[in-house]
Image (spheres, rainbow, N blue to C red):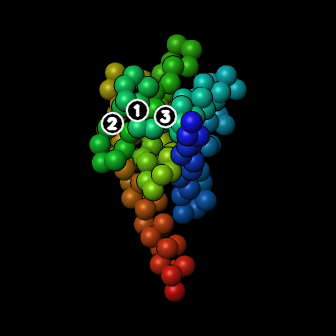
Amino acid sequence: MKPVQRLPAVFYCSPSGHEPVREWLKSLSAADRQMIGEDIAYVQYKWPIGKPRVDYLRSSVWEVRSNIGNRIARVLFAVVESQVILLHGFVKKTKQTPVNDIELAIKRLKAWKHEEDQNQSTHRQ
């Protein structure tokens, strides 16, 4: 039997060194962090998957859906070069994922890709 491959999860890091998803997770209770972490791990081991745990939003951005008590948490991510890039996390307050949150994740994904391109061109020289 073929061993299960796990996609590594990578926290988006801003140019100033902040990791917004990691910082957001640290602000939650241990139980909430555990539930969200289990859902992210499920994505890492089972990708590609769909609803109800994961849903496509747009522009390569997906969301992991986590029920934490009586609230709903979302971690927006992208899969790039066999890595799960964790872009944005929040507790949902509306039925649909807010456009501003999706746009923030897209902006962070573009910044992450730009940084990766810069690092690769530096290593080639």
Which three-letter amino acid code belongs to the residue tagged 2? Tyr
Which three-letter amino acid code belongs to the residue tagged 3? Lys
* Residue 51 x/y as whole percent: 37, 25
Local packing at callout 3 (Cα closer than 10 Å; few below 14, some 14-19, many 20+) is some
Kindly identify the residue that appears in the image at 46 percent across and 32 percent down.
64
* Residue 82 x/y as whole percent: 48, 52
Secondary structure beneath label 3: helix
Secondary structure beneath label 2: strand
Gap between marks 3 and 2 measured at Cα: 15 Å
Query: Of all residues shown, which one is farthest toward the front?
Result: 1
N-term-proximal mark, 2 vs 1: 1
Q: In the rendered image, is residue 6 in sight?
A: yes
Circles 2 and 1: CB atoms closer than 8 Å: no
User: Where is mark 1, residue-wise?
Assistant: 49
Query: Of all residues shown, which one is farthest toward the top?
Result: 70
User: Where is mark 2, residue-wise?
Assistant: 56
Secondary structure beneath label 1: loop
In this rendered view, identify the residue nearer to me: 13 or 9: 9
Q: In the rendered image, is residue 20 in sight?
A: no
Kindly identify the residue that appears in the image at 34 percent across and 47 percent down.
60
Q: Which mark is residue 46?
A: 3
Circles 3 and 1: CB atoms closer than 8 Å: yes
